[in-house]
Image (tube, rainbow, N blue to C red):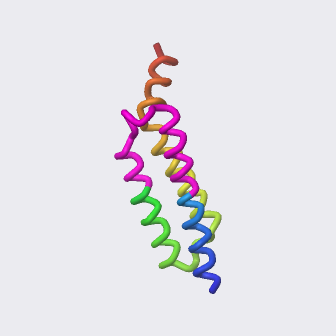
Amino acid sequence: MKKTLSTIIVAGFVVLMTATFSFAEYNATGAGSFPFFQLGCLVVGGLIIISLKYKFEKMYMGEVVGAFALYTLMIALFTAPVIEAVKTLVS
């Protein structure tokens, strides 16, 4: 029961982080240049992390949530609005 409950909590966090990423990118870029590739990478990464959490019982829920939060941040850094902001800061 504990294994299933922690996996459900991690899955909920993955869904919330993915939805937050989608909402932020839609507001930043609009529908015309939405980063579907990055969204797909985020979904696949979330599925992998959830399956790892389910398979390995010794992984703490906080570790998994932190790893996915950092993964989401890394994916968000490689989107067009962030890269354009870095270009303007550098030049």
Q: Position of residue 64 (x, y in %)?
A: 57, 64
Q: Quadrant of the N terminus?
A: bottom right
Q: Is residue 66 left or right of residue 78?
A: right
Asked if residue 68 lies in the magenta stretch, the reply is no
Q: Position of residue 84 (x, y in %)?
A: 44, 24
Give the farthest residue toward the left. Answer: 37
Give the farthest residue toward the front. Answer: 31
Total number of numbered discs in the rendering: 0
Asked if residue 24 lies in the magenta stretch, the reply is yes
Q: Residue at x 44, y 65 (%)?
A: 47
Q: Could you say which is closer to the camera, residue 60 or residue 51?
A: 51
In which image quadrant can residue 8 be found? bottom right
Q: Is residue 85 above or below residue 48?
A: above
Q: Is residue 13 left or right of residue 40?
A: right
Q: Could you say which is closer to the camera, residue 43 or residue 48?
A: 43
Q: Residue at x 43, y 38 (%)?
A: 78
Give the farthest residue toward the bottom. Answer: 1
Q: Is residue 33 left or right of residue 17?
A: left
Q: Could you say which is closer to the camera, residue 74 or residue 44?
A: 44
Q: Is residue 87 above or below residue 49?
A: above
Identify the magenta region.
16-42
Q: Position of residue 69 (x, y in %)?
A: 57, 53
* Overall secondary structure of the magenta section: helix
Q: Residue at x 44, y 29 (%)?
A: 83
